[in-house]
Image (spheres, rainbow, N blue to C red):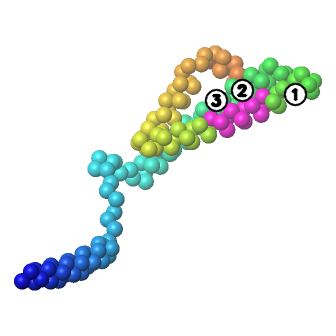
Amino acid sequence: MLNKPAARHVKTRKADNTAAAAARVKRKTRKARAPKTAINAPVHSFKEKLLFFTIELIALASITLYAIISVLAYTATWFSGTNLLSNLLPFAMGVLALIVMCTLFYIVWWHLRKFLLSHSPVLIPMTALALVLAVVLIPDHNKFFQSLNQFRTLVGRKPARKP
């Protein structure tokens, strides 16, 4: 009588092994679930993304245009003349410095854009507009008007009259 319960236990153990194996097979054949999305994440349409990108592009282009006018006008004024070493070469270095600064600005903007996109897509155009406002409101407008006249002279046009 002592051997009978042991024999039953072995049989049930085999049955348990086959059930576990069948369960393992079932687990492997289950379809993978789609990752859960955030409940409160807003879905932006194509028109909204296009609007955000357009605002960002116009803002960055206006900042770049402002920088080009300012820097080229000031370097043209500082280094006006025809002497190669004292006038033309420093002006060319100023143009090269402008190119390097704009490139660095866009590299920094690209990294900032990635960071802002991870938080919210709306932050990208808002930050670009804030930069434009900072560029437009902080400097003195009389100096910018002077540099705009210097830039117009540099490209061969008559300076505009002050309004």
Amino acid on which disc 2 is placed: Val
User: Which residue matches tag 3?
Assistant: 66
Q: Residue at x 83, y 21 (%)?
A: 79
Residue range (magenta): 94-105
**Distance (Cα) linking label 1 and label 3:** 23 Å
Query: Residue 132 placed where, x, y %?
Result: 54, 30
The quadrant where residue 65 appears: top right
Percent x, y of residue 117? 46, 44
* Residue 71: assigned label: 2
Is 59 left, or right, of 41 in this rendering? right
Q: Residues within 10 Å of mark 1 (few under 14, many from 20)?
A: some
**Label 1: which secondary element:** helix
Q: Which residue is mark 1?
A: 88
Q: Residue 63: where, in percent of width, then height?
A: 60, 32
Reply above or below: 101 against 27.
Answer: above
Is disc 2 surrounded by few (<14), some (14 to 19) or many (20+) residues within 10 Å?
some
